[in-house]
Image (cartoon, rainbow, N blue to C red):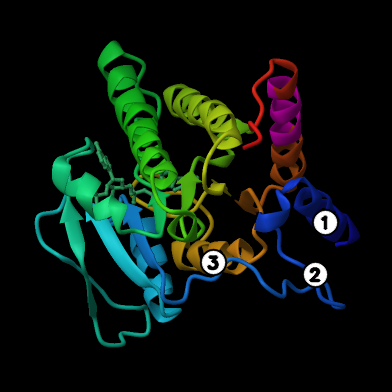
Amino acid sequence: MKFTINARQHLLRLVPKDNAASLGSRGEPQAGMQVEGRRIAVTGASGSLGRALLLALHRRGARPMAISRRQQPLRLAGADHDQAVEIPTLTWSGRLTPALEAALADVDVLVINHGVNLHSASDGEALRRTLEVNLLSALELTDLFLRQSAALPPGRQAQRELWVNTSEAEVNPTFCPYYEISKRSLGALLDVRAIASPCPVRRLVLGPFRSALNPIGVMDPDWVAESILRLIRWNLPLVIVSINPLTYVLMPLRWILARAYLWLCGVRRSRT
Ligand SMILES: NC(=O)c1ccc[n+]([C@@H]2O[C@H](COP(=O)([O-])OP(=O)(O)OC[C@H]3O[C@@H](n4cnc5c(N)ncnc54)[C@H](OP(=O)(O)O)[C@@H]3O)[C@@H](O)[C@H]2O)c1
């Protein structure tokens, strides 16, 4: 426990001041990232985590928006069978379109969550598809969102955030080689893109949860979504939800080492 709190405080020190939550006497965040009232778009919306996040955001008073390959608007109901809610849905194919660009200009937070895992497939087509969805499409969205953010006036820029769902596959084996390669590459490229980013870039680093992508995942996606939204209030660059204690050590270490290496390479935030 003590380690977790110390690690959090250490990480908070690494976050730029205008982005860091202040700690109250009980170590609770006093002013952190709030989702209430914010327009939050989630890709991979009809998947297990996409649905769970959108529902959890709706319940917390955010204004969620689904980005999905589905043609129909997404309707979500909780496990307690409360009334289904219809989430405004933008249809895409995984690539940028003018309609998507226009919609994202109005969004406060973009959650890049879509992904595939072709498990043990090792042919060229499986590699192409995995990189296309998990890496290239995610990077295309990242670049668009950061470019749009940079062009916004400071007041509006301050409301924007990018959350990217990589995976603990960044530091732990998943026994799915192409999946690991795609998620590790995405994490490594986000390290670089985040340094000069005009808005906070947070990484969702998740352990195995049940979904079509991982039918034997042990965590419940609704619980994972709730945990993400609880932790996001700490304003941390890494939002880790896992049952593997190693992830809580290896991921921050990897993040700090990557930052240090990029600093040595001369990749630094320019002072304006
Ligand atoms: N499950 C796990 O154990 C686990 C662990 C760590 C991280 N993750 C990550 O969490 C994210 C969500 O995964 P999940 O477990 O919730 O899986 P999921 O239920 O299979 O959801 C993934 C969603 O991604 C979208 N998608 C799939 N192929 C696509 C394509 N070609 N182009 C655009 N979108 C596509 C689909 O949503 P639409 O049909 O609505 O477009 C799909 O439902 C993924 O990035 C995954 O890598 C999962």
Q: Where is residue 3 in the image (x, y as percent from the top left)?
A: 87, 55
User: N-terminal of the two: label 1 or label 3?
Assistant: 1
Which residue sits furthest left?
Answer: 71
Please provide the residue range marked out in magenta: 254-262
Residue visible at 18% across and 56% down in the picture: 90
Going by the numbered disc 1, the residue's amino acid type is Gln
Residue visible at 39% across and 53% down in the picture: 110
Residue 164 visible from this viewpoint:
yes
Asked if ligand 1 lies within 8 A of label 3, the reply is no
Label drawn at residue 229: 3
Q: Where is residue 50 in the image (x, y as percent from the top left)?
A: 35, 58
Name the residue beneath numbered marker 2: 23
Label 2 Cα neighbours within 10 Å, binned few <14 / some 14-19 / many ≥20: some
* Callout 1 touching callout 2 (CB < 8 Å): yes
Name the residue beneath numbered marker 1: 9
Label drawn at residue 267: none
Residue at disc 3, secondary structure: helix
Q: In which quadrant of the rendered image does the C terminus lie?
A: top right
User: N-terminal of the two: label 1 or label 2?
Assistant: 1
Residue visible at 44% across and 42% down in the picture: 150
Going by the numbered disc 2, the residue's amino acid type is Leu
Between 189 and 52, the residue placed more toward the observer is: 189
User: N-terminal of the two: label 2 or label 3?
Assistant: 2
- On the image, which quarter does residue 73 sit in? bottom left
Residue at disc 2, secondary structure: loop
- The CA span between labels 1 and 3 is 19 Å
* Residue 198 within the segment the image draws in magenta: no
Label 1 Cα neighbours within 10 Å, binned few <14 / some 14-19 / many ≥20: some
Q: Where is residue 260 in the image (x, y as percent from the top left)?
A: 76, 26
